[in-house]
Image: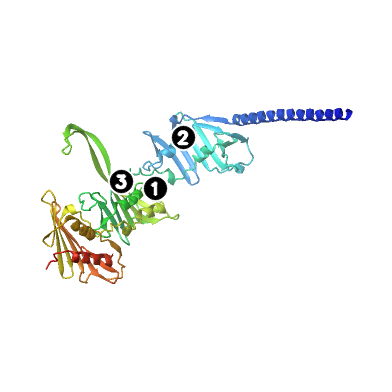
Amino acid sequence: MAKRKKKNAITLGFLALALIVLIGIYFWYDNYQKSKENNADSDEEQTIDLAMVDTTQVDSIHYVKGDTDLTFILENDVWVEQKDEERPINQEHITSILNAIKELKADRLIMESPEDLSDYGLEQPQAILTATMKDQSIVTVKIGSEATDSSGYYGLVNENSTVYLLPTELGAALQYNDLQMTALPEPPSITAENITHIAIDNRTGEDYELLYSDEEKLDNTGSNMYAWQFIKPYGEGYTADSTKVSELQAKYTTFSYLNCVDYKGEDPGKYGLEDPASSLLVGYFVSRTEALPTPETDPDTGKEVTEKTYNDPYEYKIYIGNQDEEGNYYVRIEGSNAVYTMSSESVGSMLQIDALSLLNPYILLPSLDNVDKVTVQVGDTTYQMGIDHKSTTATYTFNGKDSDEDTFKTLYQQLIGITYDSAIPSDISAGNETPYVTLTYHIFGDNERTISASFLPYDDNFYIVKKNNDTRFFADKRAVDDIAKALDSCTGKAE
């Protein structure tokens, strides 16, 4: 019994000791947390107010960084460079500098009157800014090396010899070089779907030109699927797939200039711009809506119209010259002599066009609503297909005899379904053979004319497509031969 009491007493002793230890740990942790908070508050209190600058009273700014030594003065609310007032100055960069010195604070004091300023990069500072007020008072900031932990920059403020750790934001605002201080042009506001013209002229190699036109809606889709026309390199009669062109349009909405290297541009040959390697023109429109002085009546709906939307046309053209040491291109904007740089990636994206991938694959695709006669020549045999649009319901004929609508339209769909297969290699001479098949469509109405294409023998797999006396592409031989078979199977073969 005595042993059990002794054992219980020992257990209670251990528990009491453990409780004391836990209480001690609790108080230690509580004090530790309070100490951390006090230290954090202490760190915040270390922020040192150095100067307050009323930037509206700044009259001039002297900015030195490396080889850059510029003095800006304020004239009619615009900052200009004192030695070259014609030079356009980047006003946003000046604003960034002024905003950075509104409240000059240091994160902490590093050392008072150090023996060697070079330890902090301040014997020859990275940047020196001197702001002079209208009352002739002066604020000076010198930026030295960046702190090893990237927490800020070592610096001096005014005539004080004390080295401070200045905020990263202040040091970053004083990193502009001479080129960056020259203003860049305001880029045009171009919306991709509002682009109507893309033209690229190259000193060597192929030129490219695409033009949007909604005046000819001859395709059978009832949409503007093929309203984009090739002007170059294919010429008349070749259209582009609007869905694919829309991807191309997105390339020409943003013109990003890196620097202005020569705002006067008096020697364009120095940059390869006297005889540019390439030029790029983008035609587009900007919509605006205005109230009509007198309401009008919409002829289609009969409703009163009080405002009208206008699409104002614009063009933006640049010339591309040589590349600089970093691979960026020198460029000039039409109407200006100033020389800017653009990245090789940006220029390359704009100039690289795969015309074949944009091509509308259908060789001839007139809408049946615009056609009143189709002639198909197969060897020595001629087939005539007619559509009479005069009556309420169109009537159809094949070689002068009535044809039922379904049979006629099935054959018509086969005719317009012929597509380009591939481009003819440049080393192949084509165009002198006698066509095996020639398709001719007569377009009636206000835009009356004929459009045609011929298929010339080439080999067992392809025919050469001849269109507007131009031979650029192959067509699948089987698809063309199937047309001949379908025509032959119809009744009323022409003599």
Q: Is residue 144 visible?
A: yes
Real-space Cα distance between discs 2 and 3?
Answer: 40 Å
- 227 or 487: nearer the eye? 487
Q: Which tag is nearer the camera, tag 1 or tag 2? A: 1
Q: Amino acid at mark 3?
A: Glu
Near-viewer residue (92 or 286):
286
> From what the image shows, is residue 61 above or below residue 493?
above
Q: Residues within 10 Å of mark 3 (few under 14, many from 20)?
A: some
Identity of the amino acid at label 1? Tyr
Between discs 1 and 3, the one toward the N terminus? 3
Mark 1 neighbour class, 10 Å CA radius: few under 14, some 14 to 19, many 20 or more = some
Residue 265 appears in the figure: no
The answer to whether marks 2 and 3 mark residues whose Cβ atoms lie closer than 8 Å is: no
| Residue underneath mark 1 | 257
Which image quadrant is residue 204 in? bottom left
Q: Quadrant of the C terminus?
A: bottom left
Assign a secondary structure to mark 1.
Answer: loop
**Numbered circle sitting on residue 98:** 2
Name the residue carrying label 3: 193
